[in-house]
Amino acid sequence: MSENQAEGQVEMQVHEGDAHAAYANFARVTATPEEVIVDFALNPNPFAQGKQEINVNNRLIMNFYTAKRLLSALAMTIQRHEQAFGQIELDIRKRVSLPVPPAN
């Protein structure tokens, strides 16, 4: 056993050869009593008003234990990013600077 590997800890090898990447700027989370369902999609016009149709292109289904581990990993990743690059502002009105009209 490796000196850095704690007793009872499992070492996993992850093979990414068959993985595919997809971009999403929309996620919807729903749940059943036993599973968490996360739908991912691309919203081509996220700032549009009124009704929009969004086509889900990926769905991830996991149990609550895996979902909680994912939540923890995402929180840690975002915390590190914000420490390095500053706070991620979710309110679009606070992120966008409007053009200043020319003085008359």
Image: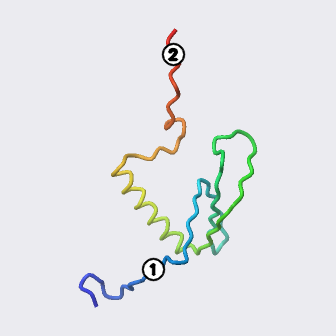
Kind of element beneath mark 2: loop
Mark 1 or mark 2, which has the lower sequence index? Answer: 1
Give the residue at x 52% y 8%. Answer: 104
**Mark 1 belongs to which amino acid?**
Val
Reply above or below: 69 against 91. below
The quarter holding residue 13 reads bottom left
Q: Nearer the viewer, residue 31 or 11?
A: 11
Give the residue at x 24% y 85%. Answer: 3
- Relative placement, left or right, of 85 versus 53 is left
Give the residue at x 54% y 39%. Answer: 92
Reply above or below: 58 against 65. above
Query: Do callouts 1 and 2 mark residues in contact (Cβ within 8 Å)?
Result: no
**Mark 2 belongs to which amino acid?**
Pro
Reply above or below: 68 against 48. below
Mark 2 surroundings: few (<14), some (14-19) or many (≥20) residues within 10 A: few
Q: Identify the residue at the far front of this view.
A: 17
Residue matched to label 2? 102
Q: Position of residue 78 (x, y in %)?
A: 42, 56
The quarter holding residue 63 reads bottom right
Report the quarter where the N terminus lies. bottom left
Colour pattern = rainbow
Mark 1 surroundings: few (<14), some (14-19) or many (≥20) residues within 10 A: few
- Relative placement, left or right, of 63 versus 100 is right
Q: Nearer the viewer, residue 49 or 67?
A: 49
Q: Which mark is residue 66?
A: none
Q: Position of residue 38 (x, y in %)?
A: 62, 65
Q: Identify the residue at the far top of this view.
A: 104
Give the residue at x 71% y 58%. Answer: 55
Q: Which mark is residue 14?
A: 1
- Relative placement, left or right, of 32 versus 22 is right
Q: Position of residue 41 (x, y in %)?
A: 65, 58
Q: CA distance from mark 1 to mark 2?
A: 56 Å
